[in-house]
Amino acid sequence: MLHPVWFRRRFMILSPNEICRGKWLAPFLLAALAAAGLPSAGRTQSLAGPFPASHAAMAAVSQAGTELGKGAAPTVPGMAPIQAAVGSVDSPNLQALARALGMSPAQIGQQAFEDSDIGMEAVSGLGDGGAPNVAVKWRPVGQGQNAGEGGESKLYLLSWDGKGWHASYLMASADALILKVLPVEGDTASLFAVVVYRGTTAAPFPVIFRFQDHQASLVWDGRSESSSYTGYHYGSIEFKKAGEGNVPVMIVAGQADPGLLMFPDSQQQTERGFQAATAYVWKNDAYIPLRTEYTHNRDYILYSFIAALHLHDYEKAYSFIEPGRFLGAPKPTLKLFQKRIQNVWPEFIDDRIFEVPARPEMEPEHHTFILRLGGGKMNVYHPTFTPGPEYRLTGLARTESNY
């Protein structure tokens, strides 16, 4: 499990470099969706959020089957202790609630909630009556809450009904998580997401809950093996209103993990790699991916070129080069390109993994990448490109070096 303070600080440091660079993908998502005959209202939205155009995406999916399932509040053996702890609190005052749970004032608030395994944070925007709701990470005193002993804390939602507090169990608590209230349309029951960040690359995984009659119930879990959700490294999740849909569209962005061309998991070369953004829409009781866009930069062209050759799709790979300059021939052809690859660069049509090493001498702007050959040897590739926005390959010099 990630140390909470380490996670929060690292994630906030990486956000400007790794996540926010994906903001410019939003116009491409919007243009692609609008080309399919979708409404263009998203064009007028503020660019303050990562993907302002996302609300239009839901219109691409038939609204049939988009109603939320009823869900069910899970039965949890640990519910009795927290309900007993808050049962005597006859006030919506958060200080009184904290005292009943054995918490200090320092454990109230967003930072306290996100940076530790015990804490509470007020949640606004749930329900229509303005009654207080609170997210709580908690474990009974007997399990080491105050003494710092072992024991797993759990995540709950507490809701004030005017007379007392109702507790809903959400999940086993992870230090690295946040809670987001989803925008909904009309009389749709309130929805919220618990976004859990996993691993050292902080890949986000959303879990969706319905909030109704002061109780929370599970609707969909992105961590499930049956879900079609994929979390991106150093990722972010935003929810946007979905036009006529009653469930908001979910936009997930982050660092792409292309596999065939591996990028360093390091801040030493934050300018390498490319971003991905996927729009998910609600259909048949689950979020499903609708469309994915990538930043069209030099690293994306390199990956696309390598991936096409990996599949022996010479025609596709040919589309990523400037033929005359790449082949050094006055009359370049696809057939000549295929022979050149087979005779000069056969490693690209083998099952090989290329990588961008985190080495200071390999400057990001040179877009160098390597292939490890074994025995301490490696091929070093030095690509050149046409100017943007196409960035077609004009050359690919290869040298051998040690590592």
Image: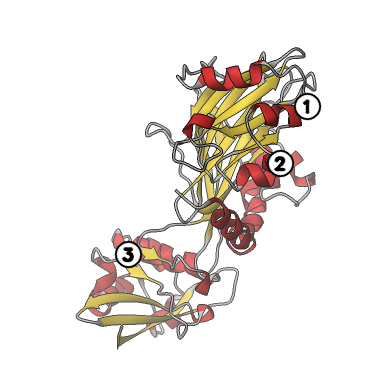
Tell me which residue sits at (36%, 73%) in the image.
333
Looking at the picture, how far across and down is residue 321, in whole percent?
A: 44, 72
User: Residue shown at 55%/37% (left/top)?
Assistant: 280
The front one of 357 and 1 is: 1
CA gap, disc 1 and disc 2:
13 Å
Residue 178: image quadrant is top right
Q: Nearer the viewer, residue 169 or 57?
A: 169
Residue hosting label 2: 109
Give the residue displayed 76% in from the left and 39% down from the top: 41
Amino acid under label 2? Answer: Gly
> In terms of sequence position, does the residue under pointer 3 or pointer 1 come before the other?
1
Looking at the image, residue 340 sits to the left or right of residue 296; the answer is: left
SS of the residue under disc 3: helix
In the image, which is nearer the foreground, mark 3 or mark 2?
A: 2
User: Is mark 3 in CB contact (under 8 Å) with mark 2?
Assistant: no
- The one nearer the camera, 244 or 157, is 157
Q: Nearer the viewer, residue 193 or 318?
A: 193
Q: Are marks 3 and 1 in contact (CB under 8 Å)?
A: no
Q: Secondary structure at mark 2?
A: loop
| Residue 236 on image: x %, y % | 59, 49
Q: Position of residue 348 (x, y in %)?
A: 29, 70
Residue visible at 42% across and 62% down in the picture: 304
On the question of residue 63 being in view, the answer is: no
List the residue tagged with mark 3: 309
Q: Nearer the viewer, mark 1 or mark 2?
A: 1
Q: Is residue 295 above or below residue 270?
A: above
Mark 3 or 2 closer to N-term?
2
Residue at mark 1? 93
